Amino acid sequence: MEQIISLKQYEQLLKGTRKQYGRLHTNCFMLAPETERVIEQGRLYFEETDQGLLFFVDEKRYYQVYFHISPDVKKLQMIPKKKPVLIRIIYMQGGKSHLQNKIDKLIAEAGFSLLDSTTQVYTVAKDNLVVMGAMYERMENLLKEYGMRLVVAGEEHLDEILKLRDSEPELKMFHIPFHTREEELQIIREGGYACVVDHSNSICAARKTERMMGSLYSPWFCVKSEYKDKYGLGIVMTGFEMKYACEHDLPRVYGWIANDNVRSWNYHKRLGVICSGKVADEWVLQENRG
Protein backbone atom coordinates (compact mmCIF):
# COMPACT_ATOMS: atom_id res chain seq x y z
CA MET A 1 0.00 0.00 0.00
CA GLU A 2 1.09 3.56 -0.68
CA GLN A 3 0.03 6.42 1.59
CA ILE A 4 -2.08 9.28 0.25
CA ILE A 5 -0.52 12.55 1.38
CA SER A 6 -2.96 15.11 -0.04
CA LEU A 7 -6.51 15.48 -1.32
CA LYS A 8 -5.04 16.60 -4.65
CA GLN A 9 -3.13 13.31 -4.99
CA TYR A 10 -6.33 11.38 -4.17
CA GLU A 11 -8.33 13.30 -6.79
CA GLN A 12 -5.60 12.88 -9.42
CA LEU A 13 -5.52 9.11 -8.86
CA LEU A 14 -9.27 8.92 -9.41
CA LYS A 15 -9.11 11.19 -12.45
CA GLY A 16 -6.38 9.06 -14.05
CA THR A 17 -8.28 5.83 -13.35
CA ARG A 18 -11.50 7.24 -14.87
CA LYS A 19 -9.56 8.39 -17.93
CA GLN A 20 -8.15 4.88 -18.37
CA TYR A 21 -11.27 2.79 -17.67
CA GLY A 22 -14.22 5.15 -18.05
CA ARG A 23 -17.07 5.24 -15.55
CA LEU A 24 -16.17 3.45 -12.31
CA HIS A 25 -18.28 1.38 -9.90
CA THR A 26 -17.64 2.23 -6.24
CA ASN A 27 -18.77 1.50 -2.70
CA CYS A 28 -17.32 4.79 -1.40
CA PHE A 29 -19.66 6.89 0.72
CA MET A 30 -17.00 9.19 2.20
CA LEU A 31 -17.69 12.88 1.60
CA ALA A 32 -14.86 15.34 0.98
CA PRO A 33 -14.48 16.47 4.64
CA GLU A 34 -14.13 12.87 5.83
CA THR A 35 -11.62 12.11 3.05
CA GLU A 36 -9.57 15.16 4.06
CA ARG A 37 -9.75 14.12 7.72
CA VAL A 38 -8.27 10.63 7.18
CA ILE A 39 -5.61 12.02 4.82
CA GLU A 40 -4.54 14.62 7.41
CA GLN A 41 -4.36 11.86 10.04
CA GLY A 42 -2.13 9.74 7.75
CA ARG A 43 -4.69 6.93 7.56
CA LEU A 44 -5.49 6.70 3.83
CA TYR A 45 -3.62 4.34 1.48
CA PHE A 46 -4.14 2.97 -2.02
CA GLU A 47 -3.37 -0.06 -4.16
CA GLU A 48 -4.03 -0.78 -7.79
CA THR A 49 -6.29 -3.71 -8.64
CA ASP A 50 -7.54 -5.16 -11.92
CA GLN A 51 -9.04 -2.20 -13.82
CA GLY A 52 -9.25 0.11 -10.85
CA LEU A 53 -8.11 1.33 -7.46
CA LEU A 54 -8.53 0.26 -3.85
CA PHE A 55 -8.39 2.85 -1.06
CA PHE A 56 -7.68 1.62 2.49
CA VAL A 57 -8.69 3.62 5.57
CA ASP A 58 -6.69 2.46 8.59
CA GLU A 59 -9.21 2.16 11.44
CA LYS A 60 -6.37 0.87 13.68
CA ARG A 61 -7.96 -2.52 14.44
CA TYR A 62 -8.92 -3.12 10.81
CA TYR A 63 -8.80 -1.56 7.33
CA GLN A 64 -11.94 -0.37 5.57
CA VAL A 65 -11.72 -0.61 1.78
CA TYR A 66 -13.36 1.60 -0.81
CA PHE A 67 -13.05 0.39 -4.39
CA HIS A 68 -13.29 2.33 -7.64
CA ILE A 69 -13.34 -0.28 -10.41
CA SER A 70 -14.45 -0.71 -14.00
CA PRO A 71 -17.74 -2.61 -14.51
CA ASP A 72 -15.67 -4.90 -16.77
CA VAL A 73 -13.35 -5.94 -13.91
CA LYS A 74 -12.45 -9.64 -13.92
CA LYS A 75 -10.67 -10.01 -10.59
CA LEU A 76 -10.32 -8.19 -7.28
CA GLN A 77 -6.61 -8.33 -6.53
CA MET A 78 -5.52 -7.61 -2.98
CA ILE A 79 -2.21 -8.11 -1.20
CA PRO A 80 -2.76 -9.82 2.23
CA LYS A 81 -2.70 -7.45 5.22
CA LYS A 82 -1.62 -7.85 8.85
CA LYS A 83 -5.11 -7.02 10.18
CA PRO A 84 -8.67 -7.71 9.02
CA VAL A 85 -10.03 -5.90 5.97
CA LEU A 86 -13.67 -4.75 5.70
CA ILE A 87 -15.61 -4.03 2.53
CA ARG A 88 -19.03 -2.49 3.22
CA ILE A 89 -21.47 -2.25 0.33
CA ILE A 90 -24.69 -0.22 0.67
CA TYR A 91 -27.50 -0.82 -1.82
CA MET A 92 -31.24 -0.30 -2.12
CA GLN A 93 -33.55 -2.92 -0.65
CA GLY A 94 -35.47 -5.14 -3.04
CA GLY A 95 -32.76 -6.79 -5.08
CA LYS A 96 -29.26 -6.28 -6.43
CA SER A 97 -28.33 -5.44 -9.99
CA HIS A 98 -26.38 -7.85 -12.17
CA LEU A 99 -23.23 -5.74 -11.59
CA GLN A 100 -23.71 -5.78 -7.81
CA ASN A 101 -24.01 -9.57 -7.84
CA LYS A 102 -20.89 -9.77 -9.99
CA ILE A 103 -18.93 -7.61 -7.51
CA ASP A 104 -20.14 -9.81 -4.62
CA LYS A 105 -18.79 -12.85 -6.46
CA LEU A 106 -15.41 -11.18 -7.04
CA ILE A 107 -15.21 -10.20 -3.35
CA ALA A 108 -15.92 -13.79 -2.28
CA GLU A 109 -13.34 -15.13 -4.76
CA ALA A 110 -10.78 -12.74 -3.21
CA GLY A 111 -11.18 -14.60 0.12
CA PHE A 112 -13.75 -12.41 1.88
CA SER A 113 -16.57 -13.86 3.99
CA LEU A 114 -19.98 -12.23 4.40
CA LEU A 115 -19.93 -11.24 8.08
CA ASP A 116 -23.19 -9.34 8.39
CA SER A 117 -26.15 -7.88 6.52
CA THR A 118 -27.86 -4.88 8.07
CA THR A 119 -30.83 -2.63 7.30
CA GLN A 120 -30.96 1.11 7.88
CA VAL A 121 -33.96 2.28 9.90
CA TYR A 122 -35.12 5.61 11.24
CA THR A 123 -37.61 7.05 13.69
CA VAL A 124 -39.37 10.41 13.47
CA ALA A 125 -38.33 11.82 16.83
CA LYS A 126 -41.38 13.96 17.63
CA ASP A 127 -43.80 11.16 16.65
CA ASN A 128 -41.89 8.69 18.77
CA LEU A 129 -42.05 10.99 21.81
CA VAL A 130 -45.81 11.34 21.41
CA VAL A 131 -46.30 7.56 21.31
CA MET A 132 -43.64 6.52 23.82
CA GLY A 133 -43.14 9.65 25.95
CA ALA A 134 -45.07 8.48 29.01
CA MET A 135 -43.23 5.16 28.98
CA TYR A 136 -39.85 6.91 28.83
CA GLU A 137 -40.78 8.96 31.88
CA ARG A 138 -41.97 5.89 33.80
CA MET A 139 -38.71 4.06 33.08
CA GLU A 140 -36.62 7.07 34.15
CA ASN A 141 -38.52 7.24 37.43
CA LEU A 142 -38.03 3.49 37.89
CA LEU A 143 -34.28 3.90 37.38
CA LYS A 144 -34.20 6.43 40.21
CA GLU A 145 -35.78 3.87 42.52
CA TYR A 146 -32.87 1.56 41.70
CA GLY A 147 -30.35 4.31 42.44
CA MET A 148 -29.51 4.94 38.77
CA ARG A 149 -29.82 8.02 36.58
CA LEU A 150 -29.25 9.10 33.00
CA VAL A 151 -26.55 11.74 32.48
CA VAL A 152 -24.93 13.48 29.54
CA ALA A 153 -21.37 12.19 29.70
CA GLY A 154 -18.53 14.50 30.64
CA GLU A 155 -14.80 14.19 29.97
CA GLU A 156 -14.40 12.29 33.25
CA HIS A 157 -16.59 9.50 31.81
CA LEU A 158 -14.75 8.98 28.53
CA ASP A 159 -12.24 6.28 29.51
CA GLU A 160 -14.88 4.19 31.27
CA ILE A 161 -17.25 4.51 28.30
CA LEU A 162 -14.59 3.39 25.81
CA LYS A 163 -13.60 0.48 28.04
CA LEU A 164 -17.23 -0.64 28.24
CA ARG A 165 -17.64 -0.27 24.48
CA ASP A 166 -14.54 -2.30 23.67
CA SER A 167 -15.55 -5.13 26.02
CA GLU A 168 -19.10 -5.46 24.61
CA PRO A 169 -19.24 -8.80 22.72
CA GLU A 170 -22.34 -7.80 20.72
CA LEU A 171 -20.52 -4.79 19.24
CA LYS A 172 -18.40 -5.88 16.28
CA MET A 173 -15.18 -3.92 15.99
CA PHE A 174 -16.06 -3.23 12.34
CA HIS A 175 -18.91 -1.00 13.55
CA ILE A 176 -16.54 1.22 15.53
CA PRO A 177 -14.52 3.55 13.28
CA PHE A 178 -11.41 5.15 14.74
CA HIS A 179 -11.44 8.57 16.37
CA THR A 180 -8.44 10.25 17.93
CA ARG A 181 -8.69 11.05 21.63
CA GLU A 182 -9.14 14.73 20.85
CA GLU A 183 -12.01 13.85 18.50
CA GLU A 184 -13.62 11.71 21.21
CA LEU A 185 -13.29 14.58 23.67
CA GLN A 186 -14.90 16.92 21.16
CA ILE A 187 -17.84 14.50 20.79
CA ILE A 188 -18.15 14.56 24.60
CA ARG A 189 -18.13 18.38 24.61
CA GLU A 190 -20.91 18.40 21.99
CA GLY A 191 -23.07 16.14 24.16
CA GLY A 192 -22.64 13.12 21.89
CA TYR A 193 -22.30 10.55 24.69
CA ALA A 194 -24.94 9.71 27.27
CA CYS A 195 -24.69 7.11 30.00
CA VAL A 196 -26.62 5.58 32.86
CA VAL A 197 -24.71 5.66 36.15
CA ASP A 198 -25.40 3.93 39.44
CA HIS A 199 -25.31 5.39 42.97
CA SER A 200 -21.50 5.31 42.95
CA ASN A 201 -21.32 7.04 39.52
CA SER A 202 -20.11 3.83 37.85
CA ILE A 203 -21.34 3.52 34.27
CA CYS A 204 -23.98 0.83 33.65
CA ALA A 205 -24.74 1.65 30.00
CA ALA A 206 -23.59 4.10 27.33
CA ARG A 207 -24.78 5.35 23.95
CA LYS A 208 -23.10 7.41 21.26
CA THR A 209 -24.96 9.80 18.97
CA GLU A 210 -23.73 11.83 16.02
CA ARG A 211 -25.26 14.75 14.15
CA MET A 212 -24.96 14.14 10.42
CA MET A 213 -26.57 16.01 7.51
CA GLY A 214 -29.55 17.29 9.47
CA SER A 215 -30.31 14.02 11.26
CA LEU A 216 -29.17 12.17 14.38
CA TYR A 217 -27.33 8.88 14.02
CA SER A 218 -26.95 6.27 16.73
CA PRO A 219 -23.95 4.08 15.85
CA TRP A 220 -23.89 1.95 19.02
CA PHE A 221 -25.32 1.26 22.46
CA CYS A 222 -23.81 -1.02 25.11
CA VAL A 223 -24.77 -2.27 28.57
CA LYS A 224 -22.69 -3.93 31.29
CA SER A 225 -23.43 -7.65 31.39
CA GLU A 226 -24.99 -7.55 34.86
CA TYR A 227 -27.54 -4.93 33.73
CA LYS A 228 -28.60 -6.53 30.45
CA ASP A 229 -32.33 -7.19 29.95
CA LYS A 230 -33.02 -5.39 33.24
CA TYR A 231 -34.25 -1.95 34.35
CA GLY A 232 -35.20 -0.77 30.83
CA LEU A 233 -31.88 0.97 30.20
CA GLY A 234 -32.33 0.79 26.42
CA ILE A 235 -35.75 2.45 26.64
CA VAL A 236 -34.42 5.30 28.76
CA MET A 237 -31.51 5.83 26.37
CA THR A 238 -33.84 5.88 23.37
CA GLY A 239 -35.97 8.50 25.09
CA PHE A 240 -32.87 10.63 25.61
CA GLU A 241 -32.04 10.32 21.89
CA MET A 242 -35.50 11.41 20.81
CA LYS A 243 -35.51 14.42 23.16
CA TYR A 244 -31.99 15.39 22.04
CA ALA A 245 -33.07 15.21 18.37
CA CYS A 246 -36.12 17.40 18.98
CA GLU A 247 -34.16 19.96 21.01
CA HIS A 248 -31.61 20.30 18.19
CA ASP A 249 -34.15 20.36 15.32
CA LEU A 250 -33.03 16.97 13.99
CA PRO A 251 -36.29 15.39 12.79
CA ARG A 252 -35.05 11.84 12.21
CA VAL A 253 -32.95 9.41 14.25
CA TYR A 254 -31.15 6.79 12.14
CA GLY A 255 -29.45 3.49 12.92
CA TRP A 256 -28.64 0.07 11.46
CA ILE A 257 -30.03 -3.29 12.61
CA ALA A 258 -28.55 -6.69 11.72
CA ASN A 259 -31.08 -8.59 9.61
CA ASP A 260 -30.78 -11.71 11.82
CA ASN A 261 -31.10 -9.84 15.15
CA VAL A 262 -34.70 -10.82 15.93
CA ARG A 263 -34.64 -9.35 19.44
CA SER A 264 -33.47 -5.97 18.20
CA TRP A 265 -36.07 -5.92 15.42
CA ASN A 266 -38.87 -6.74 17.85
CA TYR A 267 -37.74 -3.98 20.21
CA HIS A 268 -37.37 -1.34 17.51
CA LYS A 269 -40.67 -2.19 15.86
CA ARG A 270 -42.37 -1.28 19.13
CA LEU A 271 -40.66 2.12 18.82
CA GLY A 272 -42.17 2.60 15.37
CA VAL A 273 -39.01 2.39 13.26
CA ILE A 274 -39.28 2.81 9.49
CA CYS A 275 -36.97 1.12 6.98
CA SER A 276 -35.14 3.72 4.88
CA GLY A 277 -34.73 1.33 1.95
CA LYS A 278 -30.95 0.99 2.40
CA VAL A 279 -29.26 -2.33 3.15
CA ALA A 280 -25.55 -3.01 3.77
CA ASP A 281 -23.46 -6.14 3.34
CA GLU A 282 -20.24 -6.35 5.32
CA TRP A 283 -17.51 -8.55 3.88
CA VAL A 284 -14.40 -9.34 5.93
CA LEU A 285 -11.01 -10.73 4.98
CA GLN A 286 -9.22 -11.98 8.09
CA GLU A 287 -5.66 -10.87 8.69
CA ASN A 288 -2.65 -12.64 7.20
CA ARG A 289 -0.95 -14.62 9.96
CA GLY A 290 1.96 -15.75 7.84
Image: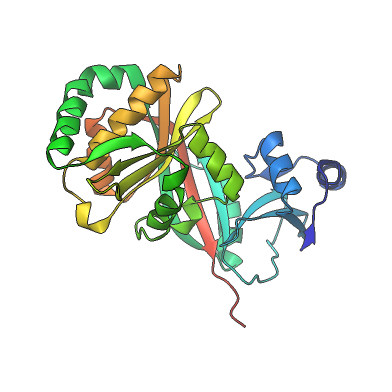
Please name the residue shown 23% across and 41% down the image. Answer: 233
Residue 285 % position (x, y)? 56, 66
Q: Toward which corner of the image does residue 247 lie, by quadrant?
A: top left
Q: Is residue 267 left or right of residue 102?
A: left
Pick the quarter of the image with the C terminus: bottom right
Residue 60 % position (x, y)? 60, 60
Q: Which residue is situated farthest in the front direction here?
A: 200
Please name the residue shown 67% across and 39% down the image. Answer: 34
Residue 96 % position (x, y)? 51, 43
Pick the quarter of the image with the N terminus: bottom right
Foreground pick, 126 / 29: 126
Residue 79, placed above or below residue 251: below
Count of numbered labels shown in the rendering: 0
Please name the residue shown 79% across and 57% down the image. Answer: 3
Residue 217 % position (x, y)? 45, 33
Residue 250, placed above or below residue 141: above
The answer, for residue 132, to whether it is visible in the render is yes
Please name the residue shown 24% across and 46% down the image. Answer: 198
Q: Toward which corner of the image does residue 112 lie, by quadrant?
A: bottom right
Q: Is residue 152 left or right of residue 20?
A: left
Q: Is residue 5 left or right of residue 197?
A: right
